[in-house]
């Protein structure tokens, strides 16, 4: 699945549940922050290496789920604001 297809699937998911009424930039930004906090919580009090996480299937799946939540909300925000996530990331890399 390409990125455009994923963005479309996310939009359909939201539409099917009639969630557009709740999706404004502030609420999506808050959701990104909440999900990022849940990602951080998975690593609280521990500092595993990437290879240690990869070898622990349960932990890897837990982190992957939280990463997906953040990613879905980020893509939703990009879609709402008509920001191309690929071009925007490339632009920002050039600025840094």
Image (cartoon, helix red, strand yellow):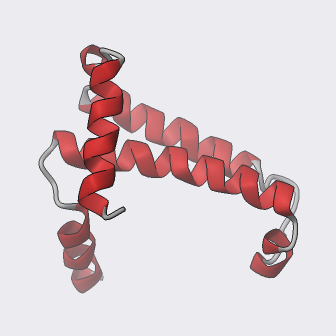
Residue shown at the point (50%, 41%) measured from the top left? 33
Q: Nearer the viewer, residue 40 or 96?
A: 40
Query: Residue drawn at (25%, 74%), measured in percent from left and top?
Result: 92
Residue 94: percent from left, percent from top: 23, 85
Viewer-side residue, 6 vs 21? 6
Residue 45 as seen in the image, left or right of residue 86 = right
- Residue 34 at x, y = what percent? 55, 36
Instruction: Say which quadrant the C terminus sits in.
Output: bottom left
Please give left or right for residue 37 compared with residue 71 in the image: right
Give the image quarter of residue 43.
Answer: bottom right
- Image point 36% across, 17% down: which residue? 17
- Residue name at image x 31 percent, y 17 percent: 22
4 or 41: nearer the viewer: 4
Residue 37 image position (x, y, % from top left): 62, 43
Residue 62 drawn at (x, y percent): 74, 50
Would residue 81 appear left or right of 18 to someone viewing this image?
Answer: left
């Amino acid at each position: 699945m390409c990125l455009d297809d994923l963005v479309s699937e996310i939009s359909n998911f939201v539409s099917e549940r009639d969630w557009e009424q709740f999706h404004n930039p502030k609420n999506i930004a808050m959701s990104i922050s909440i999900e990022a906090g849940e990602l951080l919580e998975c690593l609280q009090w521990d500092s595993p290496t990437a290879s240690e996480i990869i070898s622990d299937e349960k932990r890897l799946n837990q982190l992957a789920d939280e990463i997906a939540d953040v990613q879905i909300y980020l893509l939703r925000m990009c879609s709402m604001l008509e920001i191309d996530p690929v071009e925007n990331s490339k632009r920002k890399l050039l600025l840094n």
